[in-house]
Image: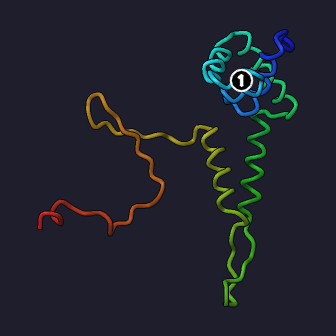
């Protein structure tokens, strides 16, 4: 498939892939601002428009050479570079310590790699026969913040 024969629809597709906002893309394509949300939704439900949008996305992905292997490789490079240790003097001291170049970025790259590889398990705990909650631990628990039933009864 190449460009759509309807110029406004073609412009809509190009504009939609810029920010994935149907209403804004409809306005930028020349459709009336009043009712742009409905127009954008109708256009996005058109098989012809959906196919063209996917084609534009695929073309851009090819131009950028974005592949899963490329992204995984770059994440690995980022993690390795950011987690390299460098010597740093403690402020106002002669003590030299080793610190990572950018621990936050390195750990985020490792997290994304781990998620891609399926290394993390989401844990759920059943609390009722038909309900579950998802528990995510983002920081260690401070034992001083834990209260026991016997502590609250006094």
Residue lying at 64% horizontally and 55% vertically, measured from the top left: 107
Q: In this view, does 122 lie above or below 37?
A: below
Q: Residues within 10 Å of mark 1 (few under 14, many from 20)?
A: many
* Residue on which disc 1 sits: 26
- The residue closer to the viewer here, 10 or 130, is 10
- In this picture the colour scheme is rainbow
The answer to whether 4 is drawn above or below residue 54 in the figure is: above
Counting every numbered tag in the picture gives 1
The picture places residue 124, in percent across and down from the top left corner, at 39, 38
Looking at the rendered image, the quarter that the C terminus falls into is bottom left
49 shown above or below 95? above
- Residue 48: percent from left, percent from top: 74, 10
Secondary structure of residue under mark 1: helix
The residue depicted at 17 percent of the width and 59 percent of the height is: 149
Left of 26 or right of it: where is 8? Answer: right
Q: Residue 142 vs residue 99: left or right?
A: left
Q: Which residue is drawn at 73% across and 68% down?
A: 85
Give the image quarter of residue 102: bottom right
For the point 74% across and 41% down, which residue is it?
72
Identify the image quadrant of residue 43: top right
**Horizontal and vertical percent for residue 19?**
71, 33
Residue 87, horizontal then vertical, whole percent: 74, 76
In the figure, is residue 71 to the left or right of 110? right
Toward the viewer: 150 or 25? 25
- Say if 141 sits above or below 38 in the image: below
Q: Look at the image and tell me in which quarter the N terminus lies.
A: top right
């Amino acid at each position: 498939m190449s460009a759509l024969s309807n110029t406004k629809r073609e412009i809509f597709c190009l504009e939609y892939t810029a920010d994935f906002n149907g209403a804004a893309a409809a306005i930028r394509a020349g459709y009336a601002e009043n009712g742009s949300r409905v127009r954008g939704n109708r256009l996005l439900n058109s098989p012809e428009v959906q196919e063209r949008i996917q084609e534009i996305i695929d073309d851009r992905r090819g131009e950028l050479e974005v592949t899963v292997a490329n992204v995984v490789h770059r994440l690995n490079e980022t993690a390795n570079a950011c987690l390299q240790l460098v010597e740093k003097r403690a402020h106002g001291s002669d003590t030299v310590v080793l610190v990572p170049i950018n621990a936050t970025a390195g750990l985020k790259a490792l997290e994304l790699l781990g998620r891609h590889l399926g290394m993390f398990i989401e844990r759920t705990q059943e609390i009722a026969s038909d309900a579950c909650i998802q528990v995510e631990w983002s920081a260690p628990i401070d034992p001083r913040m834990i209260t026991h039933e016997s502590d609250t009864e006094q």
